[in-house]
Image (cartoon, grey):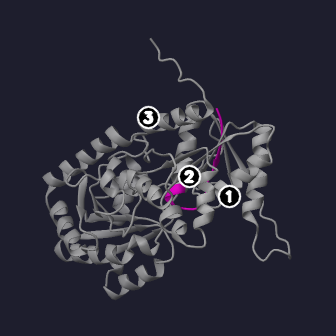
Amino acid sequence: MRIGMVCFPTFGGSGVVATELGWELAQRGHAVHFISYDPPFRLDPTAPNVVFHEVPIPSYPLFKFPPYLLTLASKIREVAVYERLDIVHVHYALPHTLSAFLAKLMNASHPFKIVTTLHGTDLTLVGQEEFFVPVVALSLQQSDGITAVSEYLRRRTLESFPGHDVVTIPNFVNLRHYRPHCGQGCRTSRAAIAPKGEKLVVHLSNFRPVKRLDLVIRVFARLRERLPCKLVLVGDGPDAALARRMVQELNLREDTHFLGNQEKVTNILAAADLFLLPSDEESFGLAALEAMACGVPVLAFRVGGLPEVVADGEGGFLLPPGNWEAMATRGSEILGDPGLHGRLGAAGRHRAKELFAADKIVPRYEAYYRQLLGEPEPAKPL
């Protein structure tokens, strides 16, 4: 198949999933064409069967804001015509689905199927703004196929926009890349941050308010009162200044490391002893899954799609939303009990392998594409 992959190239779950999916599809022999204004941050453009197409953003005095929706539509059409795309798979409904729809209208001689994958905030935040509701509705109506990354998000979608056929295909993880104790790089990362053998507590996100960096720091401050540990914060975003201010006020500066955005997080996660994700809302929780694949226990709140990823007591614990003190208590138990820590880590790795391994999830996307194209399932080897 010839697949166009449209996503935001920034640090965030939708871009990560799109990039990983494109890479996995390319490994399976499909031609994958990424279309965005910058290369997605985890994309290796030298990988076989992968091509990146840059969307130009023109500057013209008439336009107060660059017309990205239109330039993206034009680029999708250009790539679709020249490469004869079968599928244009857009990640995040706005503006990507509308751009793909316009491109399809301009490309009647070679129509393609539009697949929209909803990742969460495109529905739960942007999609709930009154001004955008009819636009999201139109995007879903013009999609040939719609997928959601969790059953929770599928239900939310149908509550807000009933009448659509939404298929749940969860996020996935490459277990060859995300694994426990991944070698010298992992040991080097750990030695640099915790030279005296302190426990490593990690949080990874885009530092938006919904991720609750304030609670990450409060939990860590409580943990630090009980045992030697270090906090590693991976990412950047609107709440970075708040986090730094809290670290300073709570006298945690010597034990807190801000690493900024990182293209490769496998060594950092594999070096961790505990992963914190006290979000107010998560449609899936990809970072939690990546930590589980590395054998790292996860502490999160029981919100959104997280219960589909982290089974309470299996790979970590889910706490009542907002109860950061309970999270700190659980964290102390995990870090102070090697047996419990080992059991949770092994269970999380097993759950990632059984439910979310790339070799189980990516074929579901392939089957979905074939269904939309009316192609038969490939014959199974005898």
Q: Tell me if mark 1 has few (under 14), some (14-19) or many (20+) residues whose alpha carbon lies within 10 angstroms of its own.
A: some
Q: Secondary structure at mark 3?
A: helix
Residue ranking furthest to the front: 163
- Answer with left or right where residue 257 lies relative to residue 145: left
Q: How many marks?
A: 3
Q: Give how far across and how far down residue 217 sits, in percent.
A: 32, 76
**Image quadrant where residue 139 sits:** bottom right
Mark 3 vs 2: CB contact within 8 A: no
Q: Give how far across and how far down residue 336 sits, in percent.
A: 15, 62
Q: Which residues are magenta?
A: 1-14
Q: Is residue 349 above or below residue 325?
A: above
**Label 2 is placed on what type of residue?**
Arg
Q: In percent of the image, x 36 and y 74: which residue is there?
A: 256
**Label 1 is placed on what type of residue?**
Asp
Q: In percent of the image, x 31 and y 85: which residue is there?
A: 251
State the residue position of label 3.
359
Measure the alpha-carbon separation of dots 3 and 2: 19 Å
State the residue position of label 2.
42
Q: Which mark is residue 38?
A: 1
Q: Is residue 313 above or below residue 321?
A: above
Q: Quadrant of the C terminus?
A: top left
Q: Give how far across and how far down residue 303 sits, in percent.
A: 32, 63
**Image quadrant where residue 330 sits:** bottom left
Measure the alpha-carbon separation of dots 3 and 1: 28 Å
